[in-house]
């Protein structure tokens, strides 16, 4: 693996919302960027920003020392990459998969890369394109050979999201991101549900947003410590008390006429934890309920 120069030629295949943002970041950080997208018109703004537009995916693969792919899913990515022409163009180069895929799909691409002399990293973007554009608050998880990750730190860092290495086993990043999606989407549903209750009650939603925006950081750390030890004794608030408080959320949701499926689901987990003997344990004991498969 050669040491990486500060700027290099990078190709971006896939110019949807995310691929375009990544290409913009690479251009802004001084790299020579080549782009390709199935719908050619999406290359125009990037061409205006300084990118070279390739005529095909294989031409883009040939142009970059590092080639990143960011399309809808594995099937789209495989349909573009798994050709003899692209394999030849990628030989000896770094391919980074940013399309959201499963760990198994990432390993399929890794095998193909190894067979064709292509270096491969599996990348999972934990950011919106707006984070990439503003260079704020984004992280990209990587798995694959650590040495490859470290040797390419410059270009990976120039995609305007903090690169974080999560393991040598290809597919680790693709599993890790799903655990974070599990948190993000359910957390956001709770956020939207609270906002809906607030709106239905005729209260200012912006006050609610201010109250919850920074909420829960220290609690998550404390819960995380309990989960690590699998020990939930001496709670500052017992599960039975927490569940009693939360039961008001279910009742008020119903009274306000907003959708109460989400709080009823949450309540179901708390009731299960109590039934399993965690009534006097911490709220974090809900983790034990979630470890079991659903019945
Ligand atoms: P998007 O705006 O819908 O763009 C999809 C891209 O995939 C387009 O470039 C599209 O080409 C291409 N594509 C789809 N099917 C194709 C096919 N069969 N052959 C060739 N190209 C194909 O999606 P996005 O938001 O950029 O997301 C791209 C990937 O990044 C997804 O896997 C997504 O999960 C991941 N991601 C996105 C975000 C985000 O906030 N947007 C965040 C993290 C991760 P056309 O333009 O020709 O249709």
Image (tube, rainbow, N blue to C red):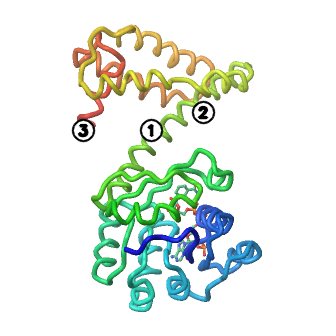
Q: Residue at x 39, y 66 (%)?
A: 121
* Mark 3 surroundings: few (<14), some (14-19) or many (≥20) residues within 10 A: few
- Image-quadrant location for residue 215: top right
Q: Residue furthest right?
A: 48
Q: Which residue is mark 2?
A: 192
Q: Earlier in the sequence, mark 2 or mark 3?
A: 2
State the SS at label 1: helix
Q: Which residue is mark 1?
A: 183
State the SS at label 2: helix
Disc 1/disc 2 C-alpha distance (Å): 14 Å
Disc 2/disc 3 C-alpha distance (Å): 27 Å
Q: Earlier in the sequence, mark 3 or mark 1?
A: 1
Q: In the rendered view, does 242 fall on the left or right side of 60?
A: left
Of circles 1 and 2, the one toward us is 1
Q: Are marks 1 and 2 in contact (CB under 8 Å)?
A: no
Q: Is residue 204 above or below residue 108?
A: above
Q: Which mark is residue 87?
A: none
The quarter of the image holding the N terminus is: bottom left
Q: Residue at x 47, y 61 (%)?
A: 153
Q: Looking at the image, which is closer to me, 80 or 22?
A: 22
- Image-quadrant location for residue 110: bottom left
Q: Which residue is mark 3?
A: 293
Disc 3/disc 1 C-alpha distance (Å): 18 Å
Residue 7 image point, x, y percent:
58, 71
Residue 184 image point, x, y percent:
49, 40
Q: In the rendered view, does 48 fall on the left or right side of 182?
A: right
Q: Looking at the image, which is closer to me, 33 or 181?
A: 33
Q: Are marks 3 and 1 in contact (CB under 8 Å)?
A: no
Q: Earlier in the sequence, mark 1 or mark 2?
A: 1
Q: Residue at x 67, y 82 (%)?
A: 52
Q: Looking at the image, which is closer to me, 195 or 23?
A: 23
């Amino acid at each position: 693996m050669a040491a990486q120069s500060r700027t290099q030629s990078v190709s971006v295949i896939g110019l949807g919302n995310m691929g375009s943002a990544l290409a913009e970041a690479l251009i802004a950080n001084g790299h020579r960027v080549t782009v390709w997208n199935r719908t050619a018109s999406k290359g125009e703004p990037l061409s205006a920003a300084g990118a070279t537009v390739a005529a095909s995916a294989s031409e883009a693969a040939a142009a970059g020392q590092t080639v990143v792919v960011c399309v809808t899913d594995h099937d789209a990515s495989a349909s573009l990459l798994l050709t003899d022409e692209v394999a030849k163009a990628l030989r000896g180069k770094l391919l980074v998969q940013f399309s959201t895929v499963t760990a198994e799909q990432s390993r399929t691409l890794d095998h193909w890369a190894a067979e064709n002399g292509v270096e491969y990293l599996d990348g999972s973007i934990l950011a919106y394109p707006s984070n990439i554009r503003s260079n704020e608050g984004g992280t990209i998880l990587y798995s694959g050979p650590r040495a490859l990750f470290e040797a390419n730190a410059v270009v990976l860092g120039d995609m305007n999201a903090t690169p974080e290495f999560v393991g040598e086993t290809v597919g680790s990043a693709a599993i890790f991101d799903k655990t974070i999606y599990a948190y993000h989407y359910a957390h956001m549903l709770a956020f939207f549900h609270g906002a809906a209750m607030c709106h239905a009650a005729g209260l200012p939603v912006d006050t609610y947003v201010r109250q919850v925006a920074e909420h829960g950081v220290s609690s998550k750390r404390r819960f995380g410590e309990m989960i690590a030890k699998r020990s939930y004794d001496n709670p500052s608030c017992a599960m039975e008390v927490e569940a009693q408080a939360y039961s008001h959320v279910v009742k008020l949701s119903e009274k306000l006429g907003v959708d109460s499926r989400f709080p009823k689901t949450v309540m179901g987990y708390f009731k299960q934890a109590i039934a399993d003997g965690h009534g006097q344990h911490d709220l974090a004991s809900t983790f034990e309920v979630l470890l079991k498969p659903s019945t």
